Image: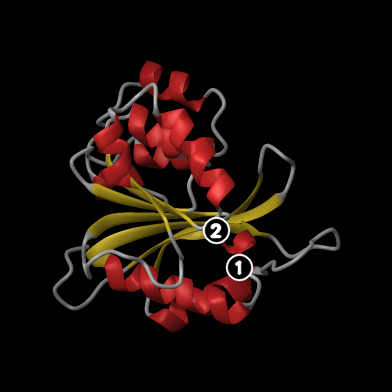
Amino acid sequence: MEGTAARIGTDTHGTEEMTQVAEGSYSEHLLRTLASVPPVQTILEIGSGWHTRALAQLGFDFYSIEPDADRFERTRDQLATLLPAESIEKRLMLGSYLNLPYTSEAFDWVVAYRSTEQLPTLRDVKQMFAEAWRVMKWGAWIYVAVPYASEHSKGLSFSEEELRHELEEVGFVVAERMAQEKGRDQMPLLRTIYRKVNEQTPL
């Protein structure tokens, strides 16, 4: 977002460290955003594997949930060289996006990077965003990247207007305007950052 670093906090990760982690990552924009997030903040990753290893390397207090058993196991193997087994068991969970097994208002950030690709219906997408809202603290941020609606789209994909509607219907407020990027697999993506706010939330 424009002014993200100033609004979230000072740069807490060195440029060299971020560059090293970015090698092999799927979204450099997400990693640059996280460079401004204090590592003491809690992050929930909805959909493990995309950035789970980077979150661990950067020392975040992160949690990750994944509905696919094979992907869950691959992510656990990736973390085995970085974290002790008891920490992995605590942070990585096999479960549904539609009924997140976390307490309400628990997280400072939610990362929903390509999570909608595992959901078959728009109703499920609405439920996922509603659950994300529930587990986010007031003032928390959600980073979203979804397949961008184009002539090459397969499965659920979104125009800017459609994604805006889904997020704002839940109650989120825009913090960074939408932009397009491509995943490492060349999938056209639409990314944005929204926030959960009320009258008492400092801006």
Side (left or right) of 193 relative to 189: left
Classed neighbour count for the residue bearing mark 2: other residues with Cα under 10 Å, few (<14), some (14–19), many (≥20):
many
- Where residue 115 is drawn, which disc sits there? 2
Q: Amino acid at mark 1?
A: Leu
102 versus 94 height, above or below = below
- How many numbered circles are shown? 2
Secondary structure, mark 1, is loop
Q: Quadrant of residue 130?
A: bottom left
Q: Nearer the viewer, residue 67 or 173?
A: 67
- Where residue 141 is drawn, which disc sits there? none
Are circles 2 and 1 on residues that touch, CB within 8 Å? Answer: yes
Q: Residue at x 54, y 73 (%)?
A: 125
Side (left or right) of 194 relative to 109: right
35 versus 4 height, above or below = above
Q: Position of residue 138 (x, y in %)?
A: 21, 68
Secondary structure, mark 2, is helix
- Where residue 119 is drawn, which disc sits there? 1
Q: Amino acid at mark 2?
A: Ser
Q: Residue at x 49, y 53 (%)?
A: 47
Q: Quadrant of residue 56?
A: top left
Classed neighbour count for the residue bearing mark 1: other residues with Cα under 10 Å, few (<14), some (14–19), many (≥20):
some
Q: Residue at x 57, y 26 (%)?
A: 24
Residue at the far left: name it: 200
Q: Position of residue 96 (x, y in %)?
A: 46, 65
Q: Nearer the viewer, residue 80 or 64?
A: 80
